[in-house]
Amino acid sequence: MSNQGRTRTIEEINQKIRSGDVQVLTAEEMKKLVESSGVEVAFKEVDVVTTGTFGAMCSSGAIINIGHSDPPIKIDQAWINGVEVCHPGAAVDLFIGATNMCKKQPYEYGGGHVIHDLVAGKEVEFRAMANGTDCYPRTSIKTTFTKDDINQFQLLNFRNCYQRYNCAVNSSDEIIYTYMNKLLPHLRNATFSGAGELNPLMNDPDYETIGIGTRIFLGGGPGYIIGEGTQHSPQNLDGTLMVKGDAKKMSPEFLRGASFTKYGTSLYVGLGIPIPILNEGLAKKTAIRDRDIFTNIVDYSVPRRDRPKFGKVSYEELKSGLITIKGKKVRVSSLSSIKMAKKVSQTLKSWIAEGLFTLTSPVERLPTTATFKPMRQTEEIPFVVSVMHPAVTCTEDEEIRAIAERIVTKSVNHIVVIDEVGKLLGIVTSWDITRAMAEGKTALSDIESHNVITAKPDEPLEIASKRMAQHNISALPVIDIEKKVLGIVTSEDVSRLLGR
């Protein structure tokens, strides 16, 4: 409650909205007011603070009811613009997910694009198949429709308004493609997402005013919170929301289909929540700054749930475009649009100020103690560390004949080249040595491979196996984050364990 015992109610604020006397600030404006005049003054002067975020929200989708055909059809499989549509309900109730991809345009066009096209008023192609029944005899249909031709077009998003994201990096030797976009090897770039101090859940982290039934800005139209989002973990500042709204009333400016190279499709969603300033405590919370919001720098090159971390970074640093990792300056880019997040909060402010949007009291508060649970697994997954063995090594100043003798005496096909502190420099195979001796070469530098494909000890063995197949090689040196050689894993090791 209020630090001084003073409060106002949502109904009092709504009366001000209806009479045109409401005082509304965006989250950006509120922070400046608190810094210049203090929390007490801000509470006296401000009734509502509007927030906003605009980013890729993969757990988004839409419920579509297309109406009955004549004769009717009980849909078994369906496609809109070539994107497969889920059929979870009755005969013509459909759900299209933002990440469903068109088979003819993988990674380029998907459910998020279909939703955007419909919201924009475009005509889409619909195709469906069925088994046929006595009361639903039709077995196929092909037609077109727009949003005006269908009965319901409801945006239903299971996990939106992520409170914060990891900052993603890649310490491996290769480019990787993720939902955090393209990550360059050797920590050469970093990406992040989220609006930081503009994010609704950062401005009311205790969910005093955000709950089931809260009216929000969603995709350019009104929407509602219908529960906590999936993987909601507010104790870790990883809260999420489940939301819905009438997509027919939304705008393509605030709902945009997206493609991530070699990863998949998504939907960019503009979402904003009005925070009623009911007490001084809320006025103080809405003053939070990017410098006070931290997230983890996470190595996405390790495909495990508990990925290695390189420490923490503030959103102030992230938004500066440059962060420091292990003493090295790394360029960082945002996958969210701060400009659009500001536009969301500004648009919501104008709706309230013009009397077009009133506030609602939550009918139920969202949980504040929930934590994210990982999947329960009943089968043990083998990792590289479980099969790797010590690598046979050499240094660059050794003679080829000595290395050849080592291959024979150790009965191996790969020799890993290291420096004086054990860091990886290259690799040579028995074939390289045989060819070098046949051609009379004596210098290791003439035959070693410097572009070495590697593995990490905590990688799933399946991933290492796929990497060997992809590059048509039979072994991977296993290294740590400092590139020190820990061992080696071979295709024979993989085959023995995986039973191939």
Image (cartoon, rainbow, N blue to C red):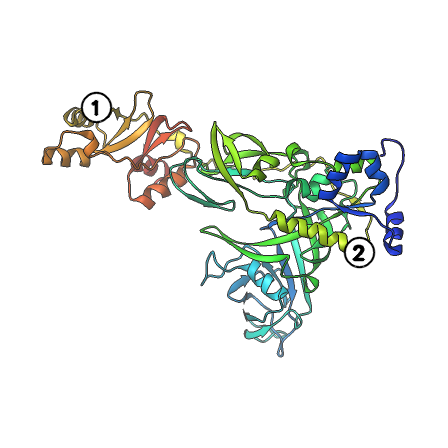
**Residue 455 placed where, x, y %?**
38, 34
**Relative to 171, is 157 above or below?**
below
* In the displayed structure image, the side of residue 219 where residue 309 appears, left or right: left
Q: Going by the picture, which residue comes out furthest to the front?
A: 36
**Quadrant in the picture for the N terminus:** top right
Q: Amino acid at mark 2?
A: Phe
State the image coordinates of residue 190 (x, y, percent, origin top left). 50, 39
The correct choice, above or below, for 94 with respect to 30 in the image is: below
Query: Relative to the observer, which residue lies in front, 377 or 343?
Result: 343
What residue is drawn where x is 81% and y is 54%? 353
Q: Residues within 10 Å of mark 2 (few under 14, many from 20)?
A: many
Label 1 element class: loop
Cα distance in 3D space between marks 1 and 2? 75 Å
Q: Which residue is mark 1?
A: 397
Q: Nearer the viewer, residue 434 or 395?
A: 395
In what quadrant of the picture does the C terminus appear?
top left
Give the side of residue 436 with respect to residue 332, left or right: left
In the foreground, 98 or 314:
314
Residue 186 visible somewhere in the drawing: yes
Look at the numbered disc 2 and give the secondary structure of its residue: loop
**Can you identify the residue that label 2 sits on?**
357
Q: Is residue 89 visible?
A: no
Residue 422: quadrant of the picture: top left
Say which residue appears at 41% left-offset and 30% top-offset. Answer: 457
Front one among 191 and 347: 347
